[in-house]
Image: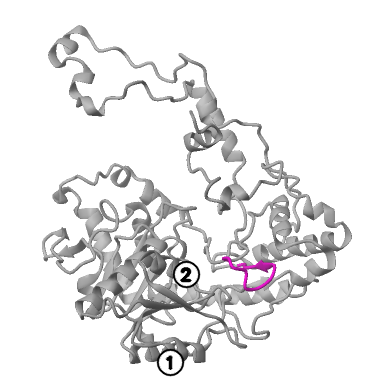
Amino acid sequence: MGNIRKNRDFHEARWDEPIIMELGSPGERGVMIPLASDTIKNDVGSGEDLVPEGLLRKKSPALPEMSQMQVLRHYMRLSQETIGTDINIDIGLGTCTMKYSPKINEQFARSAELTELHPYQDESTLQGILEIMYRTEQYIKAISGMDRVSLQPSGGSQAIFANVETIRAYHESRGEGGQRDEIITTILSHPGNPGAAATLGYKVITLFPDKDGLPDLEALKAAVSCRTAVLMITNPEDTGIYNDRIRRFVDIVHGVGGLCVYDQANLNGVFGITRAKDAGFDMCHYNLHKSFSSPHGCQGPAAGAQCVSEKLAKFAAAPTVEFDGEKYYFEYRHPDSIGKLRKYYGVPGVIVRAYAYIRSLGPEGMKQIAELSILNNNYMLKKLLTIPGLSMPMAEGKFRMEQARLSWEQLTKDTGVTTDDICRRIVDYGFQDYFASHHPRVIPEPFTPEPVETYSKDDIDEFVEAFRSIAEEAYTNPELVKSAPHKAALGCQIDESYLTEWKKFAATWRAYKKMENPDS
């Protein structure tokens, strides 16, 4: 390569395009369906007669009435306003692990054999996908070292919820359910861990980092007691600092009768290097998107894997996929299980991508994922840290693995330009807005990039130079950065309160319209 232009001249399409619910004209159609003949009407009667009265609508649904050309034009315009992993360099989306998903795997996931599956099919017609699920579970058992894997979770957060449910079931089986009402986690672990625990009624104890950027070991010793149900911890955390004392954490919690859960939603820096079981953990979970190559789907589609040790196996989510030597089948007969987490079982498209990814790479290839991710990250950090106003404040000088949490604090003090301003401005360079870390912002003005294994040296160089250019703009023309974006599909800065305040949040168009007019 070597000839990629730095700071390319980018300008995204910007269409003044209404949402599809506001398009079309009454009576317009994309397809004219022929009316049934009199013979068919006489034989089968009216279609409405086949639907139970309680399921019939009182009036037709308010759907847009449009021609095929209008529908195609609408979605083509939206596609031109979209940035994603196939278009730009997504290094900035740290912890989301945005890597290239091989297109042959996409063809598998989109094949008719998979897309036409129906959850109510008889198991005898599902042997292919059940075999893939079963084999995927076996591979994940090897990767984690655990004894049982369930692909029931819809994603990482639901896997965390399943983990807490499993922990509760285990302690209740020992007569300690009421006693062990505290969970311990860290401020830099995924917020889904304390969120799930609090939802299920647990008291949450949070550990903060020490001078080395690691969860404070002395604080853990002070926190554990006969009330400790579990330690839920990520390693490495979002800072990219690997906790080399992790076994001591596990032993301390086990010493008071608690369990230990390893949040490995982002596995990219430790593939083939460390395993949850070898560090003494009782349980872990993975995302089958992200580290296993399916694109991170902004709330879906996603798939999680709950991995448990032998003593927790009977409590794990059910059904499981089993093989009796002749056929694959769902096994529901787990009387101590926490049961189903969702309708049906897993997300087949994501599971197939993960299966193909594992099979194509093999054990050595999986290890190279981690090695290349670590190499890419440290090359990128060396270049990023030459940019004025950018620093890596926590545990300065300590080695980072596959990502790091940086800070624009000095640039903000010097220019008034914040990380949120830079996040909007980077879109003008043809990059997706970046990840500014989970709240609360332990590090001021955070910036958390993750280059993973699939980006080239040229990709990293281009990414770094864009931020170097924005830093120069901040020092010479800060208003240009503060008023961004200028070349993006979005022509104005959005009111973020609609994303963060639940009273303003609307998940659907109809909910938004109802919020505008509560009496409608």
Question: Which sits earlier in the primary sequence, circle 1 or circle 2?
Answer: 1
What segment carries the magenta color?
438-449
Q: Which residue is mark 2?
A: 266
1 or 2: mark nearer the eye: 1
Asked if labels 2 and 1 touch by Cβ distance under 8 angstroms, the answer is no
Magenta run includes residue 236: no
Which quadrant of the rendered structure holds the N terminus? Answer: bottom right
Outermost residue on the top side: it is 38
Q: Position of residue 266 (x, y in %)?
A: 47, 69
Amino acid at dot 2 = Asn
166 in relation to 218, above or below: above
Colour theme: one colour
* Mark 2 burial class by Cα count in 10 Å: few <14, some 14-19, many 20+: many
- The image shows residue 425 at horizontal and vertical percentages of 73, 54
* SS label for mark 2: loop
Identity, as a three-letter code, of the amino acid under mark 1:
Arg
Magenta stretch prevailing secondary structure: loop
Q: Would residue 74 be found to the left or right of residue 263 on screen? A: right
User: Is residue 444 part of the magenta span, yes or no?
Assistant: yes
In the picture, measured across the screen, residue 368 lies left or right of residue 139, that is right
Q: Which mark is residue 248?
A: 1
Residue at coordinates 84% horizontally, 64% vertically from top-left? 415
User: Percent x, y for residue 189?
Assistant: 50, 73
Quick check: 243 above or below 501? below
Determine if residue 4 is in view: no
What distance separates the C-alpha of mark 1 from that of mark 2? 22 Å
Image position of 401 (left or right of 275):
right
Q: Position of residue 275 (x, y in %)?
A: 39, 81
| Disc number for residue 39 | none
